[in-house]
Amino acid sequence: MTKTRFAPSPTGHLHIGGLRTAVFNYFFAKANNGQFILRIEDTDKERSKDEYTKAILEGLKWCSIEWDDICYQSKRNDIYEKYLNKLFEEGKAYKCYCSKERLEKLKEEQMKNGENPHYDGHCRNLKEQPEDKPYVVRIKLPEEDIDFKDYVHGDMHFSYKEFDDFIIKRSDGSFMYNFTNVVDDIECGITHVIRGDDHLTNTAKQIALYRLFDKNPPEYAHVPMILGEDKTRLSKRHGAKSVLEYKDAGILPEALVNYLIRLGWSYGDKELFNREELIKYFNLENLNKSAAVFNPDKLLWLNAEYIKNMPPDELLSYLSGFLDESCKEYDKEYLKKAVETMQARANTLVELAEGMKFYCKKPDVYEGKGSKKYLKQSVKEPMLFLLEKLESADFSNEESLKEAFELTMKEFDIKMVKIAQPVRIGLTGRSAAPGIYEMLMILGKKESLERIEKVIDVIPNPSS
Ligand code: GLU
């Protein structure tokens, strides 16, 4: 069975790059009827923090990247010891007592001779093991070149000479990343590893470990890094936020997942993918070979698409944390109608919530530019006339509202915009807002008339 994993180290927040790795692994597993495992690589006690683990879990849950199983490396020491003992028994690992000073001197000499610094195997075959002396554990690196096929990078080749007997256990007793990573991938039966291509060299070392354990390595796809628009590695500088910050900024998780999947993978020129389509189409063959550039505007565009096309019911559940206090008094049906009129006009949930606030609260100010342009003394009389017509109109019937406006236009021989804009400003405080009739129908007669009366009050009287 296909089994993938996402293996974050909880030494920082979950970022766009990490989430993308999780998304790729998740959809590859699901596309192949397989399992997706979450492994928290928290062996570094100093730098790992519970709050980061919590944020990682929360970010993944928010994006509905659900794991079939979860494990924490900090609880798996017994397993690592077992694997280490096996290496000792088979003479594939050894304790190294070399002092810092010796290693530094060695490095200096090697560099003087134009060699790459590497461990010289001094402790490989010690006759006697000194007692009470701190030691690290090193593997005996197999003297075989390392070749593997990568879905993105093709045929990879590393000479064993590029590596040395690297350390797998530190002198404080903690295990090194490459060791625990391989042990866990073996133990969990991971079949495919999809991760950033900054791990390519680690992969070569890890394959050496698979050899020592007499196991076949998984298949690999090392995806190019995400870059900022200036083509340097994506960071906060480029406006990239942690995953939960996108949530707070009013991005829909569906949009973020869709955006990330396209950041390094493509399926023809299709841009919008729902989950079912991703489960159907996602593969490793279509991973892009070149680095992807993070484009915040495209994310906003996608988000707007998702907001526009989402059933109002569903949208409302995402919106609840963003809505103005005043909206809490209104029932779901009312808010649903309000959302429907606004959802095609917002890039984010923050914008949507802000934009629909007027449905729940009278505007306290009228937009300056619009007021200057539309609240002119020449419309005072037409507005008073319209108000009177609206008083006797049926607000549940669009035709009846239309009639009130048409009568006004005819009476004063003016265009719709002349009266529609003052009404719009009166209802919402702004001159750009949804259709007049839909707003009037949703707000209802009493509320609409109160707001129109109020805006008429600020229109200057015609000079007599
Ligand atoms: N903990 C490693 C990291 O966060 C995992 C890398 C891997 O996927 O093997 O970079």
Image: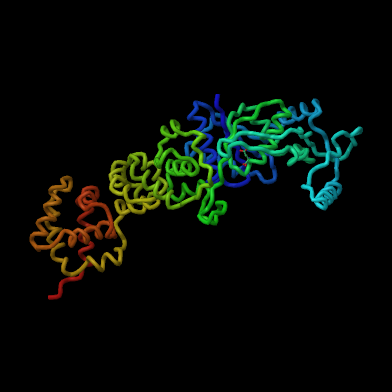
Direction left: furthest residue: 411
Colour logic: rainbow
Q: Pick out the residue farthest to the bottom.
A: 464
**Residue 325, can we see it?**
no
x and y, in percent, of residue 280 in the image: 43, 30
444 left or right of 189 in image: left
Residue displayed at 21% across by 48% down = 441
Between 14 and 289, the one lying in front of the other is 289
Q: Is residue 131 left or right of residue 319?
A: right
Residue drawn at x 55%, y 24% is 1
Residue 138, horizontal then vertical, whole percent: 79, 36
338 to 96, vertically: above or below = below
Query: Is there any visible trace of residue 150 in the rendered image?
Result: yes
Q: Position of residue 4 (x, y in %)?
A: 56, 31
- The percent coordinates of residue 108 (x first, y second) are 83, 51
Quadrant, the C terminus: bottom left
Q: Is residue 96 left or right of residue 52?
A: right
For the residue pair 80 and 228, the one nearer the viewer reads as 228
Q: Nearer the viewer, residue 251 or 58?
A: 251
